Amino acid sequence: MTEFYRGEMQRANIWRTRLDTTTNWAVITTAATILAVFGSVAYHYSVIILSTFIVSFCLWMEARRYRYYELWSYRVRLMETDFFAAMLVPPFAPSPEWAENLAESLLQPSFSISMWEAFGRRFRRNYIWLLSVLGLAWGLKIFLHPTPATTWDDFVMRAAFGPISGGVMLSIGLAYNGLLFLVGLATAWLKRAPGEVLPKFGDFPILSDLWTDGESGEKKDDSAVFLRRRQQLLTLIVTAKPQAVADRIMKDMKRGVTSLHGQGMYTQQERPVLMVAVMVTEMARLKTLVQAEDPNAFVIVTPAQAIFGRGFQPLGA
C-alpha cells in the first residue's frame, strides 16, 4: 500500500505540474502582449484580442488537465482519509468501505468533477486576474494610442476593427469577458473536488452570497466534501446528565444532538436518550467527552448505511 500510495502521488504530482505549465504559458502570453502593445504604437489592440483567445484556450486546456489531476488525487486522498488516518484512531483499522471505493476507481475510472466545475475553479484561482489585466489593457490601448481620447465618441470610433464598428466591438468584448466571469462565479457553489484543499467562500464577501443552496437559500456545509467516503456511525447515549453531555458535544465537536424520550423498564425511570451522528474518526473524541461529564453513561454505537444532512452527505446526493 505504501508503494501504491507513492505511485498515485507521483501521478497526481505529474498532472499538477502540467497545470502549472499551462498557467505559465498564459502568464507569459499576457506579459508579452502588454509589453509589445504598450511598447510600440505600431501594435494594434487586435493583438490583445488574440491574446485573450489564447489565454481562454489555455484556461480550457487547464480545466481538462485539472479533471485528470483530480482523478489521481482522489485515490491519494481516499488512502489518506480511509486507510492511513483510520488506522491512527480507534478502532485502528481501515474504513470498511475504503477498499470497495478504491477498487471501483481502479476498475471503472471516472472524473470526480465536471468540466464546468474545473473551468470555474481554475478561472477563479488564476485566470480571473489574467483576463482582467488583458481587458484593462484593451481599454487603455484604445484610450491612449496614438493620443488620449478626448470624448466618448472618439473612444468608440477607435474601437472599430475593419468593417466592424466600434460599438459592436465594445459590445462583443464586454459580452465575451462577462460570460467568462459569469461562468467562473456561478460555479463557485460546486465543491466536488476531493484532491485539493478548497477555500471557505464565506471568507470572501464576493463569493459568500453565491455559496447558498438554490432551493432553501441556506449556506452549504463545505465540510461534507469527503465525509460521505468515511464510515458513519449513529450513537445513542443514556446519561443522567443529558444537558451537560449535549452541551459538551455541541461545543467541542460541533455536532448536533437530538434528545429522545426513554424509560428504563427495570428502574421505571424516565431519562432522555441523546442521539448523535458522527464519523468513525470522531468516535474516540465522543467517548472521551461523554466519560468526562458522566462516567456511568451507557453508550450504544451502530454503523449507519448513510447519513444525509448538514455535516454529512447532501440530502440531494
Image (cartoon, rainbow, N blue to C red):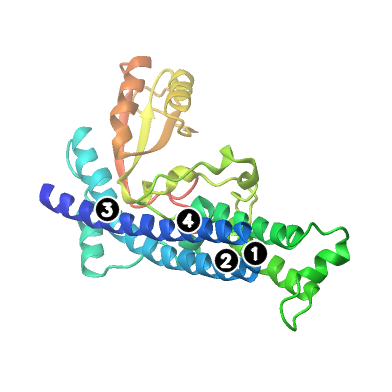
Q: Which residue is mark 1?
A: 177
Q: CA distance from mark 3 to mark 1?
A: 31 Å
Q: Earlier in the sequence, mark 3 or mark 2?
A: 3
Q: Secondary structure at mark 3?
A: helix
Q: Earlier in the sequence, mark 1 or mark 4?
A: 4
Res. 52 mark: 2
Q: Earlier in the sequence, mark 4 or mark 2?
A: 4
State the residue at coordinates (50%, 51%).
125
Q: Which residue is mark 4?
A: 27
Asked whether residue 204 appears in the rendered view, the answer is: yes
Q: Earlier in the sequence, mark 4 or mark 3?
A: 3
Q: Earlier in the sequence, mark 2 or mark 1?
A: 2
In the picture shown, does residue 299 fall above or below 18? above
Q: Secondary structure at mark 1?
A: helix
Q: Earlier in the sequence, mark 3 or mark 1?
A: 3
Q: CA distance from mark 1 to mark 4?
A: 17 Å
- Nearest the viewer among 194 and 102 is 194
Circles 4 and 2: CB atoms closer than 8 Å: no
Total marks placed: 4
- Nearest the viewer among 43 and 57 is 43
In the picture shown, does residue 73 fall above or below 262? below
State the residue at coordinates (64%, 45%).
206
